[in-house]
Amino acid sequence: MTVNVEAFGAVISEVMGETLTRIAALDGRLHYEVAASQLRSAASRLRDDPRLDFAVLIDVAGVDYLGFGKAEWQAEKATGSGFSRAVNRRDPALEAREASGQRFAVVYQLLSIRHNQRLTLKVWAEGGEEPVVDSLVDVWASANWFEREAFDLYGILFRDHPDLRRILTDYGFIGHPFRKDFPLIGNVEVRYDEQLRRVVYEPVSIEARTLVPRVIRHDERYDPIVNEAAAK
């Protein structure tokens, strides 16, 4: 049975009360934010209450908000006269979180088969360089490898996870490659040494490069006069 999204949102508000905060979205889905201290209890209620019945956890993803809304590309000289990718949109709420040291979030995608509804749940991790949230493996077993992936790629620690270790990167990998401040060239090079007959790690030998569009051209969409005329 399919239930209207807004009607189902009213049911969620009735069941969850002030535990969840509705986030405005443009895709017609239900988006909510929960405090880290309420994550486990909220997840259990979303799963167990028959009025919601979010029995399936589809995905868990980490998010790094470092530099969000400041600049998409830190290359004003390369893009300032052409097809600029620079942005300047700042959310006051994100600025407050950044000032408090909150940088990482975890996003859960839930599915209620009974009600044919999807829900996106976001929680801000506690801590800065060592972000921590509670594990939800005991709520949804499918969270196991998803949380390991978020740990591997973002360095997000999941409290009480039964086996939190890397799942995608190589043994001995340094750092977390999906963090915004992770160098694009990596930290080490890996090669097979014929004499030693084993894989060896060495310092990176290639030069760092900035991945920006190489074609610099005029684009009238960014001309103030054209934009003002279009607005009229």
Image (spheres, rainbow, N blue to C red):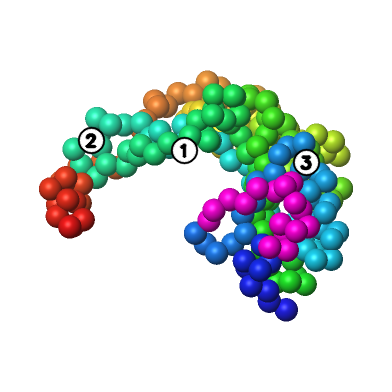
Residue 120 image offset from top left, x and y in percent: 64, 54
What secondary structure is marked by label 1?
loop
Residue 140 image offset from top left, x and y in percent: 81, 53
Q: Is residue 54 magenta?
A: no
Residue 97 image offset from top left, x and y in percent: 57, 30
Q: Quadrant of residue 37?
A: top right
Instruction: Name which residue lies at 73% across and 37% down.
Output: 36
Amino acid type, callout 1? Asp
Q: Decide which of tag 2 and tag 1 comes sooner along the chain.
A: 2
Amino acid type, callout 2? Gly
- Residue 103 appears in the rendering: yes
Task: Report the front residue among 131 and 120.
Answer: 120
Q: Quadrant of residue 126?
A: top right
Tell me the tag on residue 91.
1
Label 2 vs label 3, nearer the camera: 3
What secondary structure is marked by label 2?
loop
Tell me the tag on residue 38.
3
C-alpha distance separating marks 2 and 1 = 23 Å
Dot 1, how many residues are within 10 Å of its Cα: few (below 14), some (14-19), or many (20+)? few
Amino acid type, callout 3? Gln
**Residue, disc 2:** 80
Instruction: Name which residue lies at 71% across and 39% down.
Output: 35
What secondary structure is marked by label 3?
helix
Residue farthest to the bottom, as pictured: 1
Q: Which residues are magenta?
A: 10-25
Q: Decide which of tag 2 and tag 3 comes sooner along the chain.
A: 3
Instruction: Name which residue lies at 17% across and 51% down.
Output: 228
194 shown above or below 113: above
Total of numbered circles in the picture?
A: 3
Please state, as top left, top right, bottom left or bottom right, where the C terminus lies in the image.
Answer: bottom left
C-alpha distance separating marks 1 and 3 = 24 Å
Look at the numbered discs 2 and 1 and tell me whether their residues touch, using CB distance below 8 Å: no
